[in-house]
Image: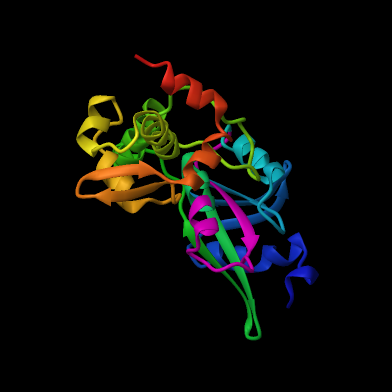
């Protein structure tokens, strides 16, 4: 069965079988809930959609007023499981403390699988695991002299701390002439000065003798594209 031919109702039977096999009493369309599954005092609610949508997440969040065991159910996505998109989707559902059921439509029949179970989200642990990313973000922020980018831009060149450091070095080489990394660091270009000069990512620098660098003609021309930064660094004490 192709995804374009799948309806929400097609998800019901495989999900019903999944919970019946675990001893739950299953009902469809109860008080606006797509599926309910009850065993003893446990109540599970499943909300179904053909795709993961904001509407589906809102519905599921509302059901969390009734129980902490809420699942969303969707057909198996066309994109690869465990891709970045899949990973990001699972992260969002974990943050929302929602479960995920995926229904696969095979030649042998439809089959429902629980991919995520609802569970409390440990925010502190998540931040601890991403401590390095946080540190790198703060380094990037502190490495910028001002805000030269427009938030939301995705088709324009972004001014990064690295590029700004390159511009700073180019400014001082243009002003000072042939200079050593040591002297550039004294002017405030930072610990990455030698690395930037040797990598020469933008083609702005040239080594003319041992430990001595100059700015290239390409560097001089491209510095003209950043008048604000050039003025900032040349006037910096």
The residue at the point 73 percent across, 67 percent down is 10
In this view of the protein, which residue sits in the foreground, 155 or 134?
A: 155
Query: Where is residue 175 drawn, in percent x and y?
Result: 39, 28
Query: Where is residue 96 drawn, in percent x and y?
Result: 51, 39
Quarter holding residue 64 = top right
- Image: 107 above or below 71: below
Query: Quarter holding the N terminus?
Result: bottom right
Q: Residue furthest bottom?
A: 107
Query: Does residue 127 belong to the magenta stretch?
Result: no
Query: Where is residue 40 drawn, in percent x and y?
Result: 47, 48
Query: Does residue 87 belong to the magenta stretch?
Result: yes
The residue at the point 66 percent across, 45 percent down is 155
Query: Quarter holding the C terminus?
Result: top left
Is residue 96 at least partly visible in the picture? no
- Point out the stretch of residues depicted in magenta: 66-88
Is residue 222 at least partly visible in the picture? yes
Count all numbered tags in the image, as a single digit.
Answer: 0
Query: Where is residue 177 drawn, in percent x and y?
Result: 34, 34
- Image: 2 above or below 99: below
Say whether residue 34 is left or right of residue 211.
Answer: right
- Image: 24 above or below 215: below
In this view of the protein, which residue sits in the foreground, 165 or 64?
A: 165
């Amino acid at each position: 069965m192709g995804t374009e031919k799948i309806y929400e109702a097609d998800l019901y039977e495989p999900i019903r079988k999944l919970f019946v096999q675990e001893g739950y009493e299953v009902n469809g369309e109860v008080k606006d809930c797509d599926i309910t599954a009850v065993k003893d005092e446990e109540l599970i609610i499943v909300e179904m959609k053909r795709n993961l949508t904001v509407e589906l997440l809102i519905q599921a969040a509302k059901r969390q007023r009734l129980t902490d065991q809420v699942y969303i159910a969707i057909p198996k996505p066309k994109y690869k499981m465990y891709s970045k998109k899949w990973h990001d989707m699972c992260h969002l559902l974990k943050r929302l403390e929602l479960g995920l059921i995926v229904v696969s439509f095979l030649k042998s029949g439809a089959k429902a699988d629980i991919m995520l179970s609802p569970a409390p989200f440990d925010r502190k642990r998540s931040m601890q695991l991403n401590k390095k990313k946080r540190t790198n973000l703060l380094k990037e922020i502190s490495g910028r002299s001002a805000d030269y980018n427009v938030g939301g831009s995705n088709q324009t060149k972004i001014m990064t701390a690295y590029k700004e450091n390159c511009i700073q070095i180019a400014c001082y080489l243009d002003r000072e002439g042939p200079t050593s990394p040591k002297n550039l660091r004294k002017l405030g270009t930072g610990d990455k000065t030698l690395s930037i000069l040797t990598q020469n990512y933008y083609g702005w620098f040239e080594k003319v003798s041992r430990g001595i660098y100059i700015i290239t003609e390409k560097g001089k021309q491209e510095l003209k594209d950043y008048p604000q930064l050039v003025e900032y660094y040349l006037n910096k004490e």
